[in-house]
Structure formats: C-alpha cells, structure tokens
Amino acid sequence: MFTCASCGFQHAEGPVCSVCKQQYDYQCSGVSEAGYRRLGDARKSAWRCPKCKSSSSLSPLALSPQPTSQLDRMQEQLNKITSDLTPLATLAADVKSIKSELTGLKDSMEMAHEIINRFSEKVNAVESKVTKLENAASQVTVLQAHIDRISRDLQDREQWARANNAEIKGIPQKSNENLYDIAQKIGSLCNVTVRKEDINYIARIPTRVPNAVKPIIVAFNNRYMKEEFVSSSRKSKQLNISNLGFSSSANFYVNDHLTTTNKSLLSKARTLARDNNFKYVWVKNCKILAKQSDTTQTFFIKCEKDLQRITNRQQTY
C-alpha cells in the first residue's frame, strides 16, 4: 500500500515518476492500469507524472495548455468533494442511530399511551362506582331519615299507649298481695282518692335485672287521674314502705310509665346533666324535660340528638 502523491489516498499499486520519484494511482497518473501494464520496462522506468511532464522545457506541449493539468485540477476538485463528503458517512450513521432511537421512543410512547388508556378506563370505572356509591349514600341518608321518623312515630305511639299508666318501684313483693289495696294506700298517703273503678288494670311486670323487685304498673281509666296520682306522689314525703305495712323502712317511687327507649334517654340525660352542670332534668306527662338553671328556658328531649343541647348548652330561649 502507498499514498498517492496527488489525491493522498491509499492504493495498492500505481506508476512511479522517473523524475520526482513519487508514486501515483492510475487515475491521478493519467494512464490506465491496462495501458501502464502494456508499457515495456524501459518505458515504465522513463514514465513521468503529469506535473513533471508540464514542467519539462523539452516537451513541445509545455507551451500550450495541457489537458493533463486540467484533469489534475478536476481530480483535485473531486478529491476535495470526496474529502468534504467523508463526514457525511459519520452523519449518516448518526442519523441512522437517531432514527433507531426515535423508533424506540415511538414504541415507548405507544406503550405509554396504551397504559394511559388502560389507566383512564380504570379511573372511569372507579369514578362510576364512586358515583353509584354517592347516590347510594344519599339514598341511605334519605332512608335513614325515613326510618328515624318511623321509629319516632312508633315510639310516640308506644308512649301514648302508656299515657294513663303509673309505675311504682321499690315495694317488695309478698304472696297473696292485693295490688288494688296498695294503690289505694299510696293515694291516701298522697291525699288522692283512688277507687277501684278508677283503675283499668294493675299488675307487676318483669324486669331485665335478675332477682330485682318487679315494679307495679297501675293503668288508670283516664290520664287526668294518673297525672294527679303521680304529681301528688312526687310531692309527698310519706312514700316509705313502712307506711304500707312492711316491717322494714325504705322509700318507694311513683313515676310515669316510660318506654324502654325513653327510660334509656332519661338516664343518659341525667348523666350528661350532672357532667355539664345542668340543674334540672325531669319527666312530666311522659315527656322528658331539661333546664340548665332557674333563669334558662325549658326544652324537651325527644331523641339522642336532643342530648347535644346539654353537652353544647344550646337551649331554646
């Protein structure tokens, strides 16, 4: 391999100038490979390059423009163009690499787009379920309000059915006891005349507490008689079982016959009143009332929500 003295590229073989001793490739030398090979040894050893031929004063062609020189200039321009085009190969490789990367980026974007679409579908499905749940929740709220209203109506009906009843607690049970006689004696202690015909029925009822004394329920024929009986009993200081013929001494109590729900509500109201400095919680005509002090207004407690008026001290003025 040698470097051509004209174009500067590497070549395998080419003629050597007998004057300047530089070697050229066949294209730059101006002679074809076949033509050079047909030259004899003597002519090969005397061969001159285009530059040396043009500079020779013995050549009759030196006085006129040489075609070889024009070819040299063209060759130089071609060489320059070839040299300028060389970076294009690297650029082409870079473009190919960029194209490959863009193809990979495109694939990645398509994959990401597919994932986003799937995720969007899932989000839409979740949003749909949330909407259904919200609708269901609103329906539950409406239904709960409806149930609460029905429950209050049933509670009011149950309490109204007990409007004529008085409940007596704390009187021990004896065999062969006469409950009518006990009711009349309590009336006497409270200065209220209780006749047998004033009572619809009277009986002891079981309790949820084992071995507890069963209270006595007196169902009067009218509410006014019951209210007088209960009101007078609360004012009396004679409500002691010794005044009923028992050998022991203990107080007994006469109250409105509240439903189980209202009894629980009353118990909670009294506990909250004690913890929040409420002075009064009482029952009148089977209704629970509360009052913080002597100067504040009375309000009713009909449900659990009304208990907040004790804890928050929000009263009706």
Image (spheres, rainbow, N blue to C red):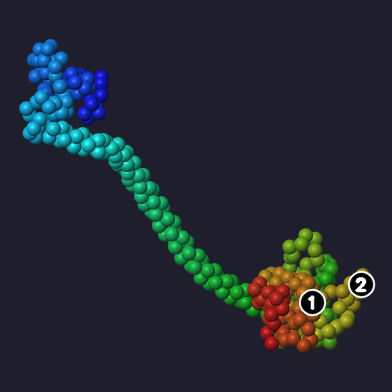
Q: Which residue is nearer to you in this view: 219 or 147?
A: 147
Mark 1 is surrounded, within 10 Å at the Cα level, by few (under 14), some (14 to 19) or many (20 or more) other residues, namely few
Which three-letter amino acid code belongs to the residue tagged 2? Ser
Q: Is residue 93 above or below residue 111?
A: above
**SS class, disc 2:** loop
Q: Is 46 on the left or on the right of 156, as rendered?
A: left
Residue marked by disc 2: 249
Q: Residue at x 21, y 22 (%)?
A: 20
Residue 280 at what x, y percent from top left? 78, 80
Residue marked by disc 1: 277
**SS class, disc 1:** loop
Mark nearest the camera among 2 and 1 is 1
Instruction: Tell me the distance, in whole angstroms, between the alpha carbons under discs 2 and 1.
Output: 32 Å
Q: Residue at x 79, y 86 (%)?
A: 294
Quarter of the image for residue 155 reads bottom right
Q: Locate the C terminus and report the quarter of the image it occupies.
A: bottom right
